[in-house]
Image (spheres, helix red, strand yellow):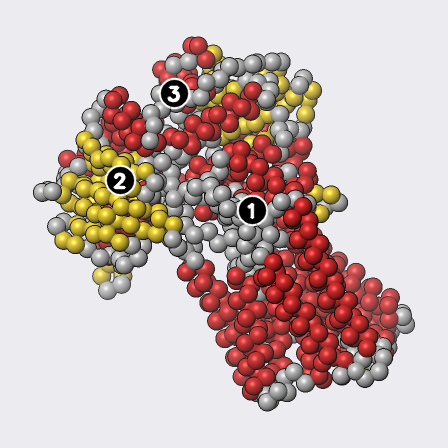
Amino acid sequence: MTVIAPEQAGPAGPSQPDKVRKPRRRVDLRQYGILAALAVIILLFQVLTGGRLLYPGNVSNLIQQNAYVLILAIGMVIVIIAGHIDLSVGSVVAVVGAIAGLAMQSWGLPWWAAVGIALIVGAVIGAWQGFWVAFVGIPAFIVTLAGMLVFRGLALVLLTGGTISGLPAEFNAIGSGTLPTAGTPDLITFAIAAVAVIALVFQLVRTRATLKRLDLPRERAASAWTKVGIASAAILYVAYLLAYNRGTPIILLILAALILIYSFVLGRTVFGRHVYAMGGNLFAAQMSGVKTKWVNFFIFVNMGLLAGLAGVVSTARAGSAVASAGQSFELDAIAAVFIGGAAVQGGVGTVVGAVIGGLVMGVLNQGLSILSVDAAWQQVIKGLVLLFAVAFDVYSKRRSGR
Amino acid sequence: MENAILTMRGIVKDFNGVKALNGVDITVRRGEVHAICGENGAGKSTLMKVLSGVYPHGSFDGVITFEGEQVAYRSINDSERDGIVIIHQELALSPYLSIAENIFLGNEVARGGVIDWNKTNAEAAKLLARVGLAENPTTKILELGVGKQQLVEIAKALSKRVKLLILDEPTAALNDDDSAHLIDLLKHLREQGITSIIISHKLKEIRAIADTVTVIRDGSTIEEFDVDDSDEIETRIIRAMVGRSLDNQFPPRDPQIGEEKFRVEHWNAYHPVDVGRKVVDDVSFSVRAGEIVGFAGLMGAGRTELAMSIFGRTYGTDISGKVFKDGVEIQTRTVDEAIRNGIAYATEDRKRYGLNLIGSITVNVSAAALGKLAKLGVIDRHREYTVAEDYRKKMNIKTSSVGALTGRLSGGNQQKVVLSKWIYSGPDVLILDEPTRGIDVGAKYEIYGIINELAAQGKAVIVISSELPELIGLSDRIYTIAEGRLTGEVAREDATQEELMRHMTAARAEGAIK
């Protein structure tokens, strides 16, 4: 991943002399801002709800109910870094859910085949939209606005306004089930958490050893270990809450895998680098040999695939397919991405940021529901949080002299 | 000092502890043309931002006196109200609005919010006459070349009753004709009593027009002296700018020219929008290994178009012709294919086509050759960092770390990043389009050294430049191009500015007869 180092001088500043001091790898403060905001919001609701926000049952719900935002936000952040937008994902969720429901109920297919079909349909829809954006050159805003109407309409056609319910229990488990448990508190959950913490520590030790061997700049040991320490504590705390409820939600594992995979893709692969390069300066990317059309195409195929997965997850969570599913999901995902520090002009953003942004939205949803705030007011509050989050971001960038 | 329109005393401006300006003093007399010189990063632009209120009063130390009164500008609006107008290097006109609309943008000739178009256009026509621009005020900006746009900017400044006109690198993007016109215009404005400050790298221009020059180095005033049109003045300015004298503007080189490396035959390209117009017309040329070949031509002659149409067909339509490397025909239909075949093209417009300005030096250096750093599509970031660090040292890119954003670098350092990127892509043929545009004397010298080094490694180097002395000083051979056609080929020994100019204008003269 690009480590964005805040430079001190303005564009016209003096050329800085070579410093003898070895450069430290610097960290992106913006992301900590978002993380701090998440912590503040959690604390706020914890106080407001008299501690009910972090009841074991509520935490499990929070994860399962907001999984769709996180999945969509991961796809959306890539779309937005590349300088596009996707307004159609909510409708894609609905049409994919409808097809999955039909596959199991009308066509008599097993649940795993239905999931496979759903993901393929999602990717095909993505390819359709990617074709218009990448090869015909129609702005993604238009293509996906059209897609929003088309796929919502198709969902209505497929379900003829009705609902498909009574889906297989295995299918529903994807959205609302948990892994098998071993006792109360659940030892499997603790085992998973322990593995995660060990992996974190191992990864840090290994990275630092490599950096040292290659004589590359490293983050200060104290700060790196503090971060791992905080992350480990958070993992263990969540594990503790889950272990005392129903164990590890299946969707949590899917989410963890997605976060790891897509962080890697964006941060470490050529494809990810091309996405950032195109968002940063499309012309320069073209002139450097980036096959921008194909990159755009695959960005939308990927978004379609993830929208398909979100369709599976939200249908499974609801236990039924309805044509009105996924209403305004695209807006939740886009909001999550921008709260997570992505730039409207493209070129900037991270998967982790988008996930944290999604969690901010999720905690707001959950906290406001526990407080039984009217749905209308919930929308007002979420809208204002988005506005202030981005305003803060713009303000802090301006202060840093840019 | 009596008769000073502007004095700035002891200006100190720091950015988080780094002093961009460290005690600048400047005195501008009423009615003169005052030049400010200094290498990129010396603090010239920062100084102008301090003066115009972009950096508000209080964010810097020192005293500014304008028209005998101490001033404290908090924004550009404040300084413009006093008659101080800055024209930036990047012009700030709205392309889809007319000349008149742009001139009066933000200052509309209106009554009760309703614009009086007749009066607007009539006033604009008067201003255009003053700056010597023969265009209809209703012409849209996008139909004008850069030179004419500059004149519109000046007309706009005049409409604001300018007392002190500041031009930041006004001729950096202009050809010789437009530059000459601009210089004449400044003289004319001086006669009308308008004081100007001109920031420029072009010493010939400063000689021709400035009355006084202030040289800034590392954020401090080094010298301030009167200017006359002499070689001694030029030498004195250079010495003050770089802290040493530059007897040789070009580093020494012993050309080792080998076999033919690169050849283009019967190359044609048409304009992408105006498809009937032939922009590159049957051009054939060749470059040998270790040879530096210059391309000279006036603005719009088709030099960049030729280069870009060869490099991955990034310009033009209906392109035809053959490209050979080491005697074997190669294809360059996409940028990727061109790079794989060992061709690199460093653009003339580094901000638009060359760099990801919100990306670090590291990601920019590796951008054209990620394949070399990746296995199965996964980038080896440690090696990438090492490569970037290596180029930072080799190319002397002045920054504290390769994690710095390229958007924050000075022009010379940005150009070094662009060159690093293309050198790292491992080309055999390098096309360098205006490699020293808008960068200072010291950085230019370094870049000439890099170009020589590339040739010494046996690469074929093509340099496109608008500065004839640069081409003559650098190239082994120079092709001239006019209206899309090659009009001459001049060996280094025979190359003079007059000779080149004769070829560069050849086709135009024929056209005029017709």
Q: Secondary structure at mark 3?
A: loop
> Position of B403 compared to A76: left or right?
left
- Residue labelled with disc 2: B221
- Residue labelled with disc 1: A282
* Host chain of mark 1: A
> Position of A266 compared to A184: left or right?
left
Q: For marks 1 and 2, give the one nearer the viewer.
A: 2
Whether residue A298 is visible to the viewer of this picture, yes or no, is: yes
The residue that appears at 55% across and 68% down in the rendered structure is: A34
- The CA span between labels 1 and 2 is 40 Å
Label 1: few (<14), some (14–19) or many (≥20) C-alpha neighbours in 10 Å: many
Residue B136, image quadrant? top left
Q: Secondary structure at mark 2?
A: strand
Same chain assignment for discs 1 and 2: no
- Residue labelled with disc 3: B248
Residue A25 x %, y %: 56, 52
Locate the C terminus of chain A and report the quarter of the image it occupies.
Answer: bottom left
Name the amino acid, label 1. Answer: Leu
